[in-house]
Image: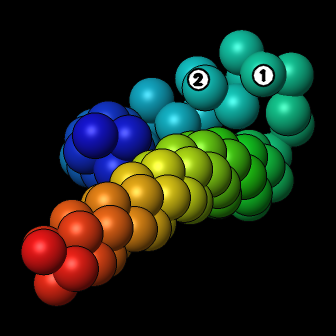
Amino acid sequence: MLWIFIMIFVMILSLFPKMFTHVANTLGIEMPVNALFFLAIFGMIVILFSLTVEISRATLKIKELSQELGILKHELKQINDSCNKD
């Protein structure tokens, strides 16, 4: 979802380049090119942070699923062992 917002922002700035000068002045940056680099680096940091959060969530989910699978295998083995004894 973050990618969509960034792409819309980039498209708007590419369609209206004068707006980028206004953005640079608002940020207190003298040259619009410097503002472009600043916003690009800031955008990459935000994307990296969001990806890190997603990886952390996925890691926790994998851990939970692995534990659940281990419990299910253990229970299945106990059921098989009790059936084989009878």
Above or below — where is 14 with respect to 21? below
Q: Is residue 58 left or right of residue 45?
A: left
- Measured as percent of width and height from the top left, residue 5 is found at 32, 36
Q: Is residue 69 visible?
A: no
- For label 1, the SS is helix
- 69 lies above or below 35: below
Check disc 2: other Cα within 10 Å, few if <14, some if 14-19, many if 20+. Answer: few
Q: Relative to residue 80, is residue 53 drawn left or right?
A: right
- Answer whether residue 6 is visible to the viewer in this image: yes
Element on which disc 2 rests? helix
Q: Earlier in the sequence, mark 2 or mark 1?
A: 2
Could you tell me how many numbered marks the image carries? 2
Three-letter amino acid code at the position of disc 1: Leu
Q: Nearer the viewer, mark 2 or mark 1?
A: 1
Q: How is the image coloured?
A: rainbow
Is 5 in front, or is 21? 5
Identify whether 6 is placed above or below 86: above
Which quadrant is home to the N terminus? top left
Q: Quadrant of the C terminus?
A: bottom left
Image location of residue 8, percent across then percent down: 25, 41
Identity of the residue drawn at 32% across and 60% down: 75
Q: Quadrant of residue 44?
A: bottom right
Q: Which residue is mark 1?
A: 27
Check disc 2 and give the amino acid type: His
Q: Residue at x 41, y 58 (%)?
A: 71
Q: Residues within 10 Å of mark 1 (few under 14, many from 20)?
A: few
What residue does disc 2 label?
Answer: 22
Q: Residue furthest front?
A: 86
Q: Position of residue 30 (x, y in %)?
A: 86, 37
Residue visible at 86% across and 22% down? 28
